[in-house]
Structure formats: structure tokens, C-alpha cells
Amino acid sequence: MEVEKEHIYVTPTELENLSDAPFSGDEENGVSGEQKTEINGNWIPATSITEAKINAKAKRRLRKNSSRDSGRGDSVSDNGETLKIGGIPTSPKGKLLDRRSRSGKGRGLPKKGGAGGKGVWGTPGQVYDVEEVDIKDPNYDDDQEMLKNLNLGEMKYSVPVLAVSLALEGKASHREMTSKLISDLCGTVVSKTDVEKSFDRLLKELPELALDSPRAPQLVGQFIARAVGDGILSSTYIDGYKGTVDCVQARAALDRATVLLSMTKGGKRIDNVWGSGGGQQSVKHLVKEIDMLLKEYLLSGDVLEAERCLQELEVPHFHHELVYEAVVMVLESTGEKTFKMILDLLKFLWRSSVITVDQMKRGYERVYCEIPDINLDVPHSYSVLERFVEECFQAGIISKPLRDLCPSRGRKRFVSEGDGGRLKLESY
């Protein structure tokens, strides 16, 4: 039985496109019979067409990956097979995570040598040195150089005197910076003799300094203790004044310095004499300080002292914690004394603008959110909170919208004792 041969007319362009077509069943089964196909009037064996498809497909792959693999040391043999020269085969997963360009342009290398990705601070292994300040820079400003150019001469001791006098009216963080400034100036601008002379001058002027700063004797004593701890003042400086001081303020300052220096023998660090700034303290420590502040106020009743202690913490962004702790103390108290004293404290801090509107609002909102948990320990907390919030609104501490946000708990009551325990539907 004769098999009719089909005549297929294929253009040269279509010849390359046929490379993507799957093999026929005869080719898969390894049919060795030679078949011919007519192309443009010429009969071409089927094996030649198959080889042409394979070569065309290999050429397209080569053109597609040439730019990507140009820097990898790849080469192509005459048969169209890709040969690796000293390369390591990559896994499909590695190709997916490859950050090289897939647009077919460029050499296929990482952008900016691997230092151009998001969150990258340089090439791998690069180490940045400490940037040194250029003295010739027009923006260069050195306090020590400025003081040297003033040509103070014998008046160098007045620099620490002026610095300490200004720091007495500042905050604890300002006094900490002043102590560091005096320590840095010693040896470059002023000598240890000048530092001793400056503290002698401060002890003589303490009666006048105490008029503007009532806590000047204690603060000057802390400056003296800190200077001894930093090594810019002799440890025998205080001993030289024993039995020779008639001024009450000077004696108080020296006694304060002696107590602080004696505490260092027990393990306390003298460099923390001014405490740490608000931003450097932990939240746990701040919560503990505020709790102690409120308990001390409830014992003494001194509103001014409570205000001073709150401002010394230097955490205006954390004043909502005081509002929260104060309201919780009212809810947990059993008498009217705590209720009235906390109300007076919040009223004073509000009128003196120590606690701002947003901090007061945030403190009350925290109480509103946690009142269900507080009610588990304090059964009557809802009624006490409603009463306290109303009193604060009448005193002008909180606004009407904040008062309206106060949660209330509906209470059901029995119709009568003989109704078998039936409950009224409405609540009040």
C-alpha cells in the first residue's frame, strides 16, 4: 500500500519558527525511514529540516542570553552547544533571586558594584573611618579655640564661675553639660589651679547666688563633688576648708559635697550626680519615679514640690503617665482625701501649663480603655470614675467631648423582692 506524501511549502522565515513546534510521533518513536519535504520546488530530507530547527532554536537562545552571560566566561561550540569555562552552574532559585538586569541590556553586573540596593551603605566589606573635622573648614567652630583667642590671661578662672552661675538656673541636663564643659576645658584652657580658684570664688558668692537660686548651696556642692570625681579638683580640696568656714551657705555646699563623695565608696557613681536626661531614662524607671512622686504628694500635700519633681524629670512627652496613675489612685482609694488631693494636683498642673491638653487627654483615654480590667479589682470603679470625670469637667481640667467619652456601665435592678427575681428591661 502506497503512502501518499504531503507537499508542504515552507518559507525561509517560517523555517525558523517551526523550531518551537513539538516533534511528531514518528520522530519520538525513532522512525528511521527517510522522508522528504518540498520547499520552493526543492525536495529536502526531513532530517535536514530537524537539524535546521535545532540550530535555529540554539541560535535564538544564544542571542537572548548573550548580554546576560557575557561576563561569565561562556562559549558556544560549532554545534550550538553552550560550554561553561570555569563557571559554576546556578540553581533556578538563584536565578529568581538574581538582581541583575533582565532587560537584556548592560553587562549583567550588579548596580553600582553591589552598593546600589535599598538600605545598602556601601559595597560589601567596606568600612567607614571616623570623619575628622577639618580645621580649615569655614564652618569649623571650636569653643576651646575661641576661648584661647580671647586672651583672658589671669581671668581664666572666671570661665567656670560664669558657667556654673548660669547652670544654677537651668535644668539637670544643663548642669550635666556644664560639668562636662569644665572637665574638657581643664588642661587646655584652664589649669587645675584655675578650677580651684573658681570654686573658691563660687563659695564666697554663694549668699548672693542663693537670692536668685535658693538651691544654690546644694547645687554648688554637687558641682564640687563632680569635679573631684572627674579628677580636675584635688581630693583634699574640701579638707582645706574644715574649721575655717563661717558662711552658712558655703558650709552647706561643702557638707553636700562630702556626703556625695562618701557615697561613692559604697559603689555609687559620681558621674550620675545630675541624673540622666529624660530621653535617656527607661520607661520602667520613669513609671517608678512618677509613682513615688504621687505617693510623696499624698503624704506631704505640697503641690509646688510635686511640680518641681515632675519638671526635673524632663519628660513632657510622658506626662500622660502621671495623669493615668493619678486617676487610678483615685479609683483604688477608699476615702475622700485622695479624691480631693488628686483633683487639686491636676487642677494646679493644668493651670500652670505643666501638663498640656494632649497629655491630659491621652491620660484620660488610657483610663477609659483599661477601666474594664480595673473594674475586676475595684468593683465600684465605674461610678467613681464618672464622679471624678464630672468634677474635673466642672474645674475646667478636661473638655466636654472628653467627658462624654467616659464609659458608663448600665445596672439592672429587681422589680421587687416578691417577683421571683424578675429584672426590669430598662437600665439606669
Image: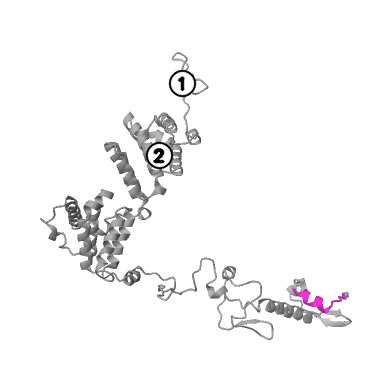
Vertical placement of residue 360 versus 162, above or below: above
Identify the residue at horizontal 73%, vertical 73% (top origin): 28
The image shows residue 190 at horizontal and vertical percentages of: 26, 69
User: Which quadrant of the figure has residue 265?
Assistant: bottom left
- Give the residue type at disc 2: Arg
Q: Which mark is on residue 394?
A: none
The residue to which callout 1 is attached is 413
Return the x and y of residue 165 as percentages of the image width and height: 28, 57
Say whether residue 11 is magenta. Answer: yes
Identify the image quadrant of the N terminus.
bottom right
* Gap between marks 1 and 2 measured at Cα: 42 Å
Does residue 358 sit above or below 269 in this rendering?
A: above
Q: Residue at x 13, y 58 (%)?
A: 241
According to the picture, the residue beneath numbered tag 2 turns out to be 351
Q: Position of residue 121 (x, y in %)?
A: 49, 69
Give the camera-side residue of 114 and 134. Answer: 134
Q: Earlier in the sequence, mark 1 or mark 2?
A: 2
What residue sits 78% from the left and 82% below the top?
48
Q: Quadrant of residue 30?
A: bottom right
The foreground one among 35 and 264 is 264
Residue, x 40% and y 36% (percent of image)? 374
Instruction: Find the magenta span and give its range.
Output: 5-19
Q: Nearer the viewer, mark 1 or mark 2?
A: 2
